[in-house]
Amino acid sequence: MRQGWASAIIVAGLLVRLHGQDAPTRQDIEAVLLKRAGAMQANQTAEILKFFEAYTTSDYSHNGKPRDVLLSELRQYPARTFVIKATYQIEDLTVNGNTAQASVSCREYNPVMEQGITDPYKARSYRETSWTERIVWVKVPQQGWKMKTLDETSALNRDRVVPAPLTDAKPINLKTNSKDDLKYVWIAPGKFVMGCSGDYPDCPGDAKPAHEVTITKGFWLGQTEVTQAAYEKVIGKNPSFFRGRSLPVESTTWQDTQNYCTSAGGRLPTEAEWEYAARAGTTEPRYGDLNKIAWYRGNSALKTHEVGTLQPNPWGLYDMLGNVWEWTADRYDGDYYKSSPGINPLGPLSGNLPRVLRGGSWDNEVAYFGPSYRSKGGPAYRDGVFGFRCVLE
């Protein structure tokens, strides 16, 4: 099982009304949070098994065991494998007229890990996750105090910012593709240094050596990752685990993305085009403060977020880092940079090789986030952290 799913499954729609004329108290908050924690724990096993059954193919295996055997064994001990505990600590509570707010520190963890039990199906999964939520109440006539859900108030957390071009951004040339209703940004041809920047402390070997690359032909690149609304319009279905029309589509295979981009009148970007656009003329390890430009493990609450809600890069592209990994057209070879051409590189042109993924996701730690970081996946593999954006010529 892949990292992070247990903490990512959060019960949505919890809505509590606090009747009467008195403002919410700490006891009211504690009762709500205890109910939420209990609901989360009760739903873990069903949700994890649902995900596993839906997103593993019949030939899936782990440690030599086929899928049907794994499913049978997973069902036998959910209590010690999947049930997580959630605790909350109220930091403050303020009341101002018809509005009340409380800041709550949240902690979710798997008790199995505290007991030191080794579980082959847990792998690295379900470690402790902590964050801070701000809960808001409003006083409704005839109903008293009404609390918004934790999910509804998430826009107040995670260092979200109002989208705005950075001060040194170039003028942005946009067009809308009528086939998928998404906006595309014109990327002019140019040169850049591909691979790790000199001051990138976590530079992996497959991103070396840094080398100059020339992109000789301009292209239109999706301003955002492909949304679920766009994918449904073009393909007619939605493979995503997290659901929302403005969320990035995920759980797509490389072939799925090829089909979509072709149907939308385009193609996947090459790895070089992707990095050129992500860097947007910058040479630093990242083009901004990570908390302001990317959804990652430190601010995502372990789920995807609506596209375009954080700061864009200087060329007006959103979520080039974080939210979901993005498929590119290229085959992956860890030694490719040692001999890659300096003009319009296309990656290895043949071979049964994985495909390159770029950008990091909501489930990754800081070290994965840089425009030069390379990952890979088999063309038929799907995961809740895999998405994409397209190129139009």
Image: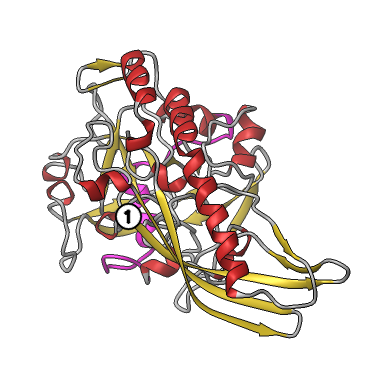
Left or right of 207? Residue 53 is: right
Q: Is residue 384 above or below residue 315?
A: above
At x 39%, y 46%, the residue is 84
Q: Residue furthest right?
A: 142
Q: Secondary structure at mark 1?
A: loop
What colour scheme has been applied to the protein in the rendered image? secondary structure
At x 46%, y 39%, the residue is 44
Q: Which residues are magenta?
A: 263-288
Give the dominant element type of the magenta stretch: helix, strand or loop: loop
Residue assigned mark 1: 128
- Amino acid identity at mark 1: Glu
Residue 346, quarter of picture: top left
Q: Is residue 378 magenta?
A: no
Q: Is residue 101 above or below residue 344?
A: below
At x 64%, y 41%, the residue is 229
Few, some or many residues within 10 Å of mark 1 (<14, 14–19, 20+): some
